[in-house]
Amino acid sequence: MHRHETPGDVRAIPAQLLDRGFRLLVLREFREVDQPPSLAWIQQYVLRDVHRVQRHGIFFGSTFLPEIMQWMSELLGRPSLHPPDYPASPAYRNKAWPSFLWHQENRVWDGDIQTVEWYADVVFVDQASFDAFIARWQDRLGGHEAEALRAAP
């Protein structure tokens, strides 16, 4: 498994498998004394970049890349559903879709550089959905560009 040896390395690394899910490094936050934090986006082939600007600043929500969203929608249905009385009642989250959680780990590099490694934890509701995802997208979770491009539909 590739592990970054320098803080400036932003190459993709393989996802860590979890129980019914995976943990993927997506962001590195540099923390220097008396300076605002700076961020490095880590290359990966499963989730969209987290740095989409929204009305109130930077949005750090996690969503799958478009081709994975399409595949997931075919497998699990739309990510949000409408109640029978929509629009009187708001749309709601499809509970069959995986949950996204943030996980952070502090890291100290040579030269006393300190970072916070930000991981997106993706946890599936059931084992069958997770197994289907792994069977289809395993190459992308490996963090290799050539394999990710071959796996694209």
Image: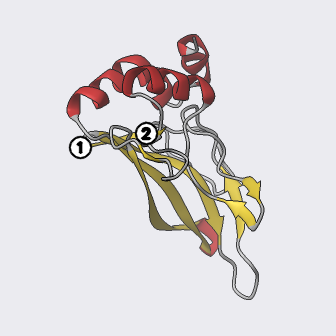
Callout 1–callout 2 Cβ contact below 8 Å:
no
Mark number for residue 80? none
Identify residue for label 2. Answer: 15
Q: Residue at x 43, y 39 (%)?
A: 15
Look at 62% across and 58% down and name the residue there: 60
* Quarter of the image that includes the C terminus: top right
> Which residue is at 69% across, 79% downward?
32
Q: Which quarter of the rendered picture does the N terminus lie within?
A: top left
Classify mark 1: helix, strand or loop.
loop
- Report how far apart the C-alphas of labels 1 and 2 lie in the structure: 13 Å
Q: Residue visible at 45% across and 65% down?
A: 105
Horizontal side, residue 41 vs residue 79: left or right: right
Q: Give whichever of 130, 17 is nearer the camera.
A: 130
Label 2, secondary structure: give it: loop
State the residue in front, 33 or 102: 102
On screen, residue 150 above or below 109: above
Classed neighbour count for the residue bearing mark 1: other residues with Cα under 10 Å, few (<14), some (14–19), many (≥20): few
- Whether 79 is drawn above or below 111: the answer is above
Q: Residue furthest bottom?
A: 34
The disc at residue 19 is 1
Name above or below for residue 26 compared with residue 146.
Answer: below
Residue 116 in the image, given as x and y percentages of width and height: 55, 67
The image shows residue 94 at horizontal and vertical percentages of 39, 41
Name the residue type under label 1: Asp
Estimate the x, y position of residue 64 in percent, counting from the top left.
55, 36
